[in-house]
Image: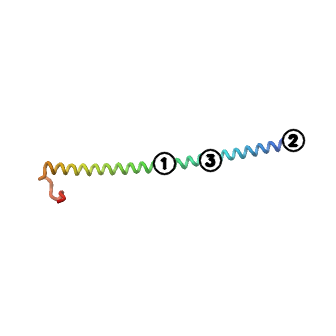
Amino acid sequence: MGNSHKWRLARMFRDILMIVGSVLIALLVNDWNERRKQSKVFEEALTRVYTDVQKERFQALRDFEESRLQWDLVHKMLEEPDTIPGDVLPF
């Protein structure tokens, strides 16, 4: 084998290694980018869920308070009907 043939093989292996290395780097960058996108989507979904839960919790507490006030009024109407002001009653 001649010296020039060895150099040609060495350049060919170098070029192949550069191509393989470039492809691997591209795959790693693509994988990193996909994980970053998925993380952002997950974070946005988590934020929406948290916001929805907070809204539902607030609504449930408000509904509970309204029910408690209505229960107190019904209880008072049954126990002490003469003490309820006329403007509170719907009729």
Q: Which residue is mark 2?
A: 3
Residue type marked 1: Glu
Q: List the residue tagged with mark 1.
A: 43
Q: Please state the horizontal and vertical placement of residue 85, each as a whole percent of the image.
A: 15, 56
Counting labels gives 3
Secondary structure, mark 3, is helix
Q: Are marks 1 and 3 in contact (CB under 8 Å)?
A: no
Where residue 82 appears, as percent x and y from the top left, is 11, 53
Say which label, 2 or 1, has the lower sequence index.
2
Q: Give the Cα distance between marks 1 and 3.
A: 21 Å
Classify residue 87 by image quadrant: bottom left
Crowd rating for badge 2 (residues with CA inside 10 Å; few <14, some 14–19, many 20+): few
Q: Is residue 50 left or right of residue 40?
A: left
Q: In the depicted view, which residue is nearer to us: 48 or 74?
A: 74
- Give residue 60's mark: none
Q: Marks 2 and 1, how far apart in space?
A: 59 Å
Q: Amino acid at mark 3?
A: Val
Identified by mark 2, the residue type is Asn
Quarter in which the N terminus is drawn:
top right
User: In the visual, does 1 lie left or right of 69?
Assistant: right
Q: State which tag comes first along the sequence, 1 or 3.
A: 3
Please state if 61 lies on the left or on the right of 33 as rendered. left
91 vs 51: above or below: below
Labels 2 and 1 touching (C-beta < 8 A): no
Q: Residue at x 35, y 48 (%)?
A: 57
Give me the disc on residue 29: 3
Q: Residue at x 57, y 48 (%)?
A: 34
* Rendered residue at 70%/44% (across/down): 21
The single residue placed furthest to the left in the displayed view is: 82
Q: Secondary structure at mark 2?
A: helix
